[in-house]
Amino acid sequence: MILKIFFWVILLKLALSTSDDFTYNGFKGVNLSLDGLAGITSDGLLKLTNASRHAMGHVFLSVPLRFKTPQDNVLSFSTTFVFAIVPEYPTLGGAGFTFVLSPSRDLTQASPNYFLGLFNMTDNGNPSNHIFAVEFDTWDSPEAEDINNNHVGIDINSYISNKSTPAGFTSDYDGKFKNLNLLSGEPMQAWIEYDGIEMQFNVTLSPLWTPKPKIALLSSTINLSSIILDHMYVGFSASVGPSYSYHYLLGWSFKMNGAVPELNLSSLPPLPQNMASIKEKAKILSLWLPLAFLGLVLVIAGAIVVGVRKKKFSELREDWELDFASNRFSFEQLYKATRGFKDENLLGIGGFGRVYRGVLPASKVEVAVKRVSHESKQGVREFVAEIVSLGKLRHRNLVQLLGYCRRKGELLLVYEYMPNGSLDNFLFFEDKQTLDWDRRFQIIKCVAFGLQYLHEGWDQVVIHRDIKASNVLLDSDMNGRLGDFGLARLYDHGAAPQTTNVVGTLGFLAPELARACKVTTSSDVFAFGAFLLEVACGRRAIEPNKQEIEQVLVDWVFANWKMGMIHETKDPKLGEDYVLEELDLVLKLGLFCSHPMPSARPSMRQVTQILHGDVPLPQLLPCQSHFSESRRVVSFQKLHILDLVAIQCVQLHLGGERLFGGSTSRNDTSLIPNGS
Ligand SMILES: *[C@@H]1O[C@H](CO)[C@@H](O)[C@H](O)[C@H]1NC(C)=O
Ligand SMILES: *[C@@H]1O[C@H](CO)[C@@H](O)[C@H](O)[C@H]1NC(C)=O
Ligand SMILES: *[C@@H]1O[C@H](CO)[C@@H](O)[C@H](O)[C@H]1NC(C)=O
Ligand SMILES: *[C@@H]1O[C@H](CO)[C@@H](O)[C@H](O)[C@H]1NC(C)=O
Ligand SMILES: *[C@@H]1O[C@H](CO)[C@@H](O)[C@H](O)[C@H]1NC(C)=O
Ligand SMILES: *[C@@H]1O[C@H](CO)[C@@H](O)[C@H](O)[C@H]1NC(C)=O
Ligand SMILES: *[C@@H]1O[C@H](CO)[C@@H](O)[C@H](O)[C@H]1NC(C)=O
């Protein structure tokens, strides 16, 4: 007790000797240290992020505050702030933001995207970070083991929360818990309090103008003394991935040792209103009113134009699509975005159709628009339902699907734009720039993660069906992202096959596909194996112009491995720049994944563990004759036949019966979301 009193006395003294409390009702003219996307608007709003993607912003008090007594006890502190998160799409925002205590105000080494602007792959989880943060997280990241895409959590040196809970508050009025949607765009107030003696930590949240609820949202007992250093910077960080949110702070107050000063809610700056621009338009319109006659002429002329436009921008819309309205783009939007699908906007032509680069007119979002011809009406509904539900798949190693549009005989799919194009461009061309080994190994790990997520990370198993270097895209940081997932399934729903790439690509089709016409996760693993070899050997899985023994990459690597010269197959463009152990691992893992027996292949979870060195690669010990026996089935000539068989499988299916199981789902074979 005496000790406690003594401690309090010291605390009091310290409290008196420092002026570590401040109140900002709006941030006009406030001297803070900002970086990245952060800025203060002319209204005095503090903006942590803006409409940029794959980026972050930080705000810190310019001077560090003293958080410990000379006896190394952590001081109590409390803070409150009002924030609003305004997302790009109603349900899809950036990663979220945090209130953070950090030994340094330079967190620019953190990765943007999903790390909340606090950590990167290397330093995540490192006790020497000395970072303590409260996250307001709007992204459901499987790697961060997030509970949902709308939660509050405590992060200690890692973006995997120590404790987290869905956003909301317990009403003082009826004692019931009420959810709050962080992405609602509405201002909310948060309180964060730490009692240095009891070591108790509370986070409380409420809608603006609601008094602080008596029951805290998140309570935890944490000994901060090894986490917090003597002096720490206080501030906020936020990050955004493929879709952005504006993260705004309207006001902030902070106090060491004592109750935090109240914010004056009526003097906080207003959030920007889209209404302003609508009002502006109304004003312009009213100018025209006196000129009624001219107006009439315009209306007639307009009607003609509209008639022509209507035809040009006509779409196919059916009643059942109402459910998917928020995922639907208008053709006019996409037409304008791609400047009329001009050739100079053409990014590529694939088995599924042409892909165009575009910039959405209103939001200036860069997108890739894929035009897929789709004559059959049969199965469209299921496919659209699938596409929409696939759009809910979010992972930093997948290319995000943003929505769709439908016209007569055509489906348009809108994806996040990947500025560095597809991986095959960097691998297979002598004259072009190539990728160093580190980058290649990194991309392999990315794709493995993405595929593992498709197979296991969701409540339904999603089978990609067409993994290959040209379906791996590179984002602005040259990270690998798996694209086109679920598209191969389109053929189950009646799209016209344009090439032989029907249910996969020559050289990537697992032998059992031909025998049983059964698509499984292990046929994806087979293709992933061929992909690994493509990356390590810098050549395509099938090269008909090579001499016979080299034509099929898997066969060639296998033959070399048997002779103990597997390294001879490495990409000559790598020169001496590679890590022998990693190259060895990738080549052998490639063979392991492409094992002719599906049951002998690893799962994607095992693959990622092996790639990260958590689990050693099992000894490749094929019962030699068996391995090569089955291998022979996949020899080049036969592959042509396999492909034809595969085509027939699809056509049989179109004939009515579902031969292609498609997704071997844990719950259900269909990808259609329940209840929609
Ligand atoms: C802001 O604060 C920093 C650190 O105290 C100081 O160096 C700088 O001069 C201040 N800037 C303004 C405009 O007051
Ligand atoms: C966001 O802010 C940064 C830094 O102030 C600026 O460079 C960038 O252009 C802004 N982006 C958008 C889309 O406004
Ligand atoms: C990760 O951040 C640390 C500092 O926190 C920095 O030293 C390191 O270089 C960063 N790593 C990468 C890959 O950016
Ligand atoms: C949370 O932090 C406490 C104290 O630092 C630690 O004992 C506990 O293991 C952590 N829990 C998790 C899930 O990280
Ligand atoms: C945390 O909240 C609980 C009630 O939820 C309260 O009893 C406790 O005093 C609070 N602690 C702090 C440090 O505010
Ligand atoms: C808190 O942690 C510090 C350092 O880890 C330790 O010295 C101290 O005894 C702990 N306090 C309590 C009350 O457990
Ligand atoms: C709060 O702000 C309003 C508007 O700026 C002002 O009129 C009022 O006096 C302020 N209240 C307090 C308690 O400072």
Image (cartoon, rainbow, N blue to C red):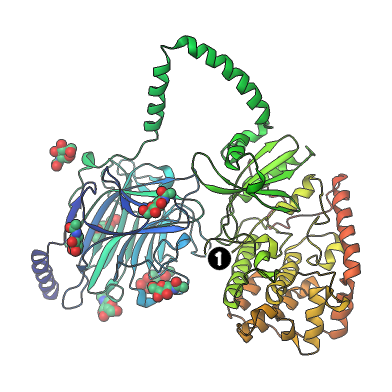
Residue visible at 65% across and 42% down in the picture: 341
Farthest residue to the bottom: give it: 564
Residue at horizontal 88 percent and vertical 84 percent from the top = 625
Name the spot of residue 632 as percent of width and height, x first.
89, 75
Instruction: Identify the residue under disc 1.
Output: 478
Q: Closest to the observer: 455 or 541?
A: 541
Q: Position of residue 406 (x, y in %)?
A: 68, 37
**Quick check: can you spot residue 456?**
yes
Secondary structure found at label 1: loop
Q: Quadrant of residue 597?
A: bottom right
Q: Quadrant of the C terminus?
A: top right
Q: Which residue is most to the top?
A: 293
Q: Is residue 338 left or right of residue 178?
A: right
275 left or right, relative to 624:
left
Quarter of the render that holds ligand 5: bottom left
56 versus 445 height, above or below? above
What residue is shown at x 86% (from left), y 58% (from top)? 646
550 vs 240: above or below: below
